Image: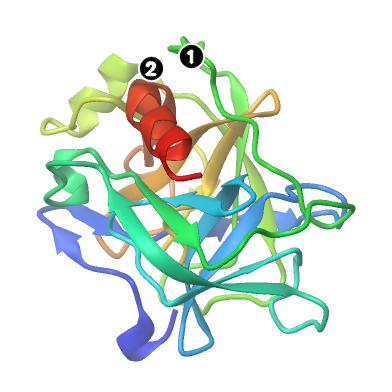
């Protein structure tokens, strides 16, 4: 993300915003729930469709519209919806303190089909095994100090043991998942926070933060919000906003 549209700031050693390092272009028929949060037509954050009129993203993200139904942000035929209301998790005060999750109410429902589907979320608390293979996707930087990309990219990442993660991040907030960016050359970088961490077809995490300004892995574990820890709040919002 460029200049004033760069969603990137430092909280101690933490930096928000993320994208794909050493990944590949996502096949057209995959990740059909992906969303691009934009400001003035420029990509700012990732997100994913959880109801026909709701997108989930990180609480530190923002935008004035959402683009869905495409892997290439400049192709015609994409679906655009304005954001009419933002539901940040109560008590959120910075990604470094956790609770980095938000629901966005869209101006009207989208039509599901061959180019757009809902993300599958956990139904209950999850227990992801160490070293389990998952994937993360987005449109942001592909290297440190790079640029956002037009085509959606995806990379496989491994789940990191929570104790190892806490050793590297002594102030690690609660209710997070650590995956990628440590002991590997794969992970995310600046430019696309709010994107999904998908494991076995279920979106279990939201891209939150990584090490300040640095995407040259191995480095520090990448941090995701654990969606399963917020299911009561998510269900309350989605049920009450018909």
Q: Which residue corresponds to the image point at 51% horizontal and 60% vertical from the top-left?
A: 46
Q: Considering only vertical position in the picture, is 99 above or below 26?
A: above
Residue 181, visible in the rendered structure: no
71 vs 22, left or right, is: right
Q: CA distance from mark 1 to mark 2?
A: 5 Å
Question: Do tag 1 and tag 2 residues touch (Cβ < 8 Å)?
Answer: yes
Residue 162 point in image, percent of width and height: 32, 18
- Could you say whether the residue bearing mark 1 is in a helix, strand or loop? loop
Instruction: Give x and y (percent) for residue 175.
Output: 28, 25
- In the picture, the disc for residue 161 is 2
Bin the neighbour count of mark 2 within 10 Å (Cα to Cα): few under 14, some 14-19, many 20 and up: some
Q: Is residue 102 visible?
A: yes
Circle 2: element type: loop
Residue 181 tag number = none
Looking at marks 1 and 2 on the same chain, the residue that comes earlier in the sequence is marked by: 1
Q: Residue 182 sits in which quadrant?
A: top left
Q: What residue is shown at x 54% (from left), y 76% (from top)?
A: 148
Q: Residue at x 21, y 38 (%)?
A: 98
Image coords of residue 199 (percent x, y): 62, 27
The reply, left or right, for residue 163 in relation to residue 76 is left
The residue that disc 1 covers is: 130
């Amino acid at each position: 993300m460029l200049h004033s549209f760069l969603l990137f700031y430092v909280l101690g050693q933490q930096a928000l915003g993320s994208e794909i390092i050493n990944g590949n272009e996502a096949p057209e028929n995959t990740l059909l729930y992906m969303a691009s949060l934009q400001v003035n037509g420029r990509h700012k954050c990732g997100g994913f469709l959880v109801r026909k009129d709701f997108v989930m993203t990180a609480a530190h993200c923002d935008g004035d519209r959402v683009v869905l139904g495409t892997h290439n942000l400049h192709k015609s035929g994409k679906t655009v919806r304005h954001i009419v209301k933002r539901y940040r998790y109560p008590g959120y005060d910075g990604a470094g303190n956790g609770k980095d999750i938000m629901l966005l109410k869209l101006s009207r429902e989208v039509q599901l089909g061959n180019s757009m589907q809902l993300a599958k979320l956990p139904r209950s608390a999850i227990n992801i095994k160490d070293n389990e293979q998952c994937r993360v996707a987005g449109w942001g930087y592909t290297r440190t100090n790079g640029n956002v990309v037009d085509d959606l990219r995806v990379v496989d990442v491994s789940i990191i043991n929570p104790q190892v993660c806490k050793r590297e991040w002594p102030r690690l907030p609660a209710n997070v998942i650590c995956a990628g960016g440590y002991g590997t050359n794969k992970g995310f970088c600046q430019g696309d926070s709010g994107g999904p961490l998908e494991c076995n077809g279920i979106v279990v995490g939201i891209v939150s933060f990584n090490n300040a300004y640095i995407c040259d892995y191995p480095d520090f574990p990448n941090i995701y919000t654990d969606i399963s820890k917020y299911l009561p709040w998510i269900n309350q919002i989605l049920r009450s906003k018909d």
